[in-house]
Image: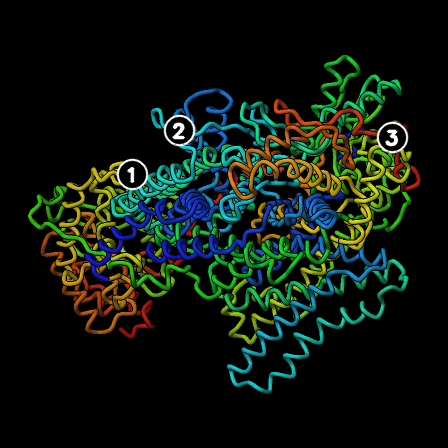
Amino acid sequence: MSKTQFRFLTLAALFLLVASPFYLNAFSMTLLNYIGVYGLVALGLVLLTGIGGMMSFGQAAFVGIGAYAGAWASALQGYSPWVGLMLAIVLSCSVALVLGAITLRLGGHFLALSTVAWGLSIFFLFGNLDGLGNYNGIANVPPISLGPLKLVASWQMFYLIWAIVLLALLASRNLLDSRSGRAMRALRGGNLLVESLGINAFFTRLATFVIAALFAGLSGWLYAHLNRFVSPAPFEVHVGIDYLMMAMVGGATELIGAFIGSALVTLTKNSIQDYLPMIAKGASGQLEIVVFSIVFIVLLQRWRGGLISISSHLLPSPHHDIDRTVTPLSRRPLPQPGEVLLTADQVERRFGGLVAVDKVSFTLNAGEILGLIGPNGAGKSTMFNLLTGALRPNSGRVVFQGRDITHAPQREIAKAGIARTFQHVKIRPKMTLLDNVLLGTHPRTTSGFFSGALRLDRAEEAQARAEALRQLQRVGLGDKPFELAGNLPLGNQRVLEIARALAADPVLLVLDEPAAGLRRQEKQALAELLQSLRSENLSILLVEHDMEFVMGLVDRIVVMNFGCKICEGLPLEVRQDAQVQDAYLGGLV
Amino acid sequence: MSSDIAAILAIDGIASGAIYVLIAIGFVLIFAVTRVIFVPFGDISAFTALTLAALETQRLPGTMGLVAMLAAMATLMQLTADIRASDLKAIPSTLFFYLVVPLVPVALMWFAAGSVMSMPVRMGLSLLLVLPIAPLLDRIVFRPIADASVLLLLTVSMALHFALVGLGLMFFGPEGVRTQPLTDASWEIAGMQVSLQTFLIVGSAVVFSTLLYAFFELTLTGKALRATAVNRTGARLVGIRPAYTGTMAYVLASILAGISGILISPVTTIFYDSGFLFGLRAFVGAIIGAMVNYPVTALGALLVGVLESFASFWSSAFKEVIVFSLLLPVLLWRSLSVGEVEDEAEE
Amino acid sequence: MKTSLRTLVAVAGTLLSGLPAHADITVGFVTALSGPGASIGIPYGKGIAAAFDYISSVSGEKIKLIQLDDGSDPSTAARNARKLVEEEKVDILIGTAQAPASIAMMAVSAELKVPMISVSPVVVPPTTDRWGVAVPQLPSLMFKAVTDRMVKDGIKTVGYIGFSDAWGDLVYSGAKAAEDRGEMKVVANERYARTDTSVTGQVLKIVAAKPDAIMNGGSATQGALPLLALTERGYKGKIYGTPALLNADFIRVGGKSAEGILVSAGPVIVAEQLPDSHFSKKPSMAFRASYQKVNGSETTDGFSAYSFDAWLIFVDSAKRAMAKAKPGTPEFRTVLKDEIFATKELAGVHAIYNFKPDSAYGVDERSLVLVRLTNGVWRYEP
């Protein structure tokens, strides 16, 4: 679908939505209200799960915090509901901050199960904290008022709910299309990738978690004033699981999936209630949940990506206008060629009894390509990880541009100007080439979550885009910037990784076996690219297995075997070295 | 708190903990072999208790209907798969394994219904009747998505739990049950009455965990299960069928869940939906054991039982809060001690 | 995809609004057929079925009854109430199994101006525009009947154990009320969840407080759990309870441990033991006959009887309202509400009802008798 068509359809849908009180009956408005309120929670879950790769069964607890904050402030303390809104936002965000700080370092299913645990704890707190009406809840929650107007009727609440929903949707969309949003979208690529881009993975996860909690809290506040009554039961873990189901069934990878899911779940439950009694008289109450669960399981068995995956071709292909005339992002000064850039000094790393890297020292000078080679198991990759901060050495020092980076975290090393690529390509297949490269510009830009969501970052974003496009052109991928990265052949994916690394404006480029798995022509193209980069005064460290590829390319070589450095020198010298010949295929070089 | 109260609480806690141990070990077993976090596992335990109670009052247990329904569904699915694959030779074995085998205990129950059975027979029959549920659910729900991510499997597992609770209500009704105790005897130890039932619970937990360990260490099937747990692809390459090991894991774990249900039913009232909270508490134990380590899992589950017991004395209203908040420090410690790990990147 | 959502909603909406074929008087009934409240919600449903069988028309006009399940969730209960009013245009709402869900329904009934009869004991906040009444004995009345008896039995201190839910809170407040009147002291307040496996800790603590008697704030089957634990710990003292324990499975599960417990109850529970002159005797016997006919089993609980009384109140008021307005109209709903609040000396199976606009409750001491569990049967203890 083209962008204009999509815009037209969006506008038409918006019009239908705004006009719905005029053609829908009262109960349909009620259902729409619930779809909006539930969808808001599911929207947070899409950001959290589909985008950020964290699963939470506990969102109902945040809805509860928002609802209780609203009900407590307005019904029990007599403040305006708007004070309740502030309280709902502050409380849900701060609880999320604390819980996130404790649990978000955990991966995958541990995180998911821990959310069940704190979800339950918070639920029991609602019932047992004095002053919250215990298990009977808080009744007589006043309606929200806009000046003299009290929002009581379904259609009045409808406009408030959907205004908030649309704002949240818009802000989320803007966010995902900004610097911080890209960091969120990178999270599912794993910590190693994210940190290597100079992104603080933990902070990004925490921020995503807080945003999801914020949406849940907002939904809770709306719920309190929609239902005008709050009690603990709707904030149980079971309901939290329902929210997650909405996001999954709708399609957790697209924002709109949240609302498709919440509409589907709400309407399915409603129609099951209507039609089931006609088929199974008497047992309908018990069967409702069974039928609903079966529908859910079958949907997920069929479409793992949720319903949105059937209709994703209807979404517009991502496309941006790129203004090439903007001033480019500022670059850091490159060191003088020949200057010592990186020094590894007696670096050692042990894994239990195994010494993977045994007191290895070498230096790398600015403007050169240094090859680090060795047979399988020589300790090259460990060395690579020690230099880039993915592993810490047990002893020894690594100095980069006069700064000791031995114990610096990965992202600090990335920010200092060492950009890396991966042996097993780590790109974000569902993001465009441009977005992948834009990830590289993260350390060079500064916009945060707020400016992203509110679109205050456009000037910087334009600069970053122009820069990313320049890097794509530099490596020869400039013709299709809006192609999805996953569609590229492996060779080009490696080149894309190099473009991403270049976008960070590195002083030193560290490549981990870039030739592995490439065909001959691809290798040749890669070698040409690296040579052209050297001619631009970029320094490169090449960790490689493929001798042939290295020999013609590099200025100097360091050879490792069994964790030790066995030789260092010009390619020709190294080729003659008996020890090296021994190490490599018993002398068959 | 006086020391004898502490002792009573500790014994009570160890008894509940022992039951959680059985369930928690089942969780870990299924997860290791199939990567499914089988949430409805607690439900299996509750269903065993409900079945036993029905037999005691000489009624037909609702489990019969449940098993028959699941067997029919699984058979249909497998037959469709066979026909699609034009593998007509497989049809007899499909009918045998998916229809006949699960229906054997149902038929037994049908004939035995109404007659007065001795307690061991009742227990054996209940256990037998519950065994097919988890493997059948595996066939119906999880096998079509065996290669999905852990998180998707977990979500489906949650949905399955909902379905089972609904079915439980349909087949067993809303009322709770409590079965006759295995024994009324109690022993006096250091001036305290400790019921024999408590010893039976703890003893069975120890015996069955040890048996499981022996099974893993000593039998070929056990080794195949372990191999699958370590590396699925590798196991397949050496000729171990994941579907087979999966079914084995579900059967083994169901035995544990069934035993836990039988042990717990004389001690407390069991409802059709009691399984979820048993399961959750066992989960806490399993998470302490990082879902891989059996001994630590067992210790964790025991710890949950004891903590629960003491928490109900200190502040009964906040008991669940205390028990589930226990996870937070454990998780915090785990996340700090693990440090920087590369987690599985997902796509 | 947004559009497809819209059309889905629109289609669903039109389908739904096209559905109801208008009967003359429409009653919307909500109860919990699933979820944690199902064990009392299902009896409520059976009670309403018996009532509908007993009387299914008013002044020659047929009554249409629509029943929905709320899954023990207040949000669903509220949504159901809206659905019944907005889609089915019901004239009156009756529901539901649990107090919070009933309060949620009452909020909707007041907003949409539809009378409501609650079948659970709700704590209705004071309001000027009252649209709902509650059938059950005011919780404080239920407990007062018990605590009065305790005073008579010479109890000075009481230990409380109850559910960690709305019902547990209510019963506790009843015990506290007696304390505030200076009648006794509540020396322990222990809670447990319906799904708990053990209450040893709670019971130890209560026994340690050495109360003269224990008040059981549980309900139905799982109300037996503390009794079993108390027996195990050798407790021999008196135990009192509330009507929520009147349940066949409570007796079965509680067994010997439950023997001798004294609870307040609606007279319907022991109808066959009542003298013929008692107000509840005749309606109770009629209720039992209808229940047996519709559900094929005997009634053993008090919950189904609340549904029955709610029906009697509705029919009684509707008779008078029919003379003033036409069912299905807003006027009728207003008149029906006014007539419900004008109910005078209506004999039901639980109580004699007198409603006034300033209160949601309309029963007095006559609605409670004390019964003791003796040999597995509730015995009337005048």
Which numbered circle lies on residue A147?
A: none
**Mark in front: 2 vs 1:** 2
Question: A110 left or right of B100?
Answer: left
Q: Which residue is mark 2?
A: A150
Q: Are marks 3 and 2 in contact (CB under 8 Å)?
A: no
Q: Which residue is situated farthest in the front direction here?
A: C323
Q: Which residue is situated farthest in the top direction here?
A: C182
Q: Secondary structure at mark 3?
A: loop
Q: Which quarter of the figure has residue B59? A: bottom right
Which numbered circle lies on residue A449?
A: 1
Residue positioned 59% across, 38% down in the render: C101
Q: Are marks 3 and 1 in contact (CB under 8 Å)?
A: no
Q: Which residue is mark 3?
A: C235
Residue C50, percent across and down? 74, 48
Mark 2, other Cα within 10 Å: few <14 / some 14–19 / many ≥20: few
Residue positioned 36% across, 28% down in the render: A149
Residue positioned 62% across, 58% down in the render: B29
Real-space Cα separation, disc 3 to disc 2, in angstroms: 57 Å
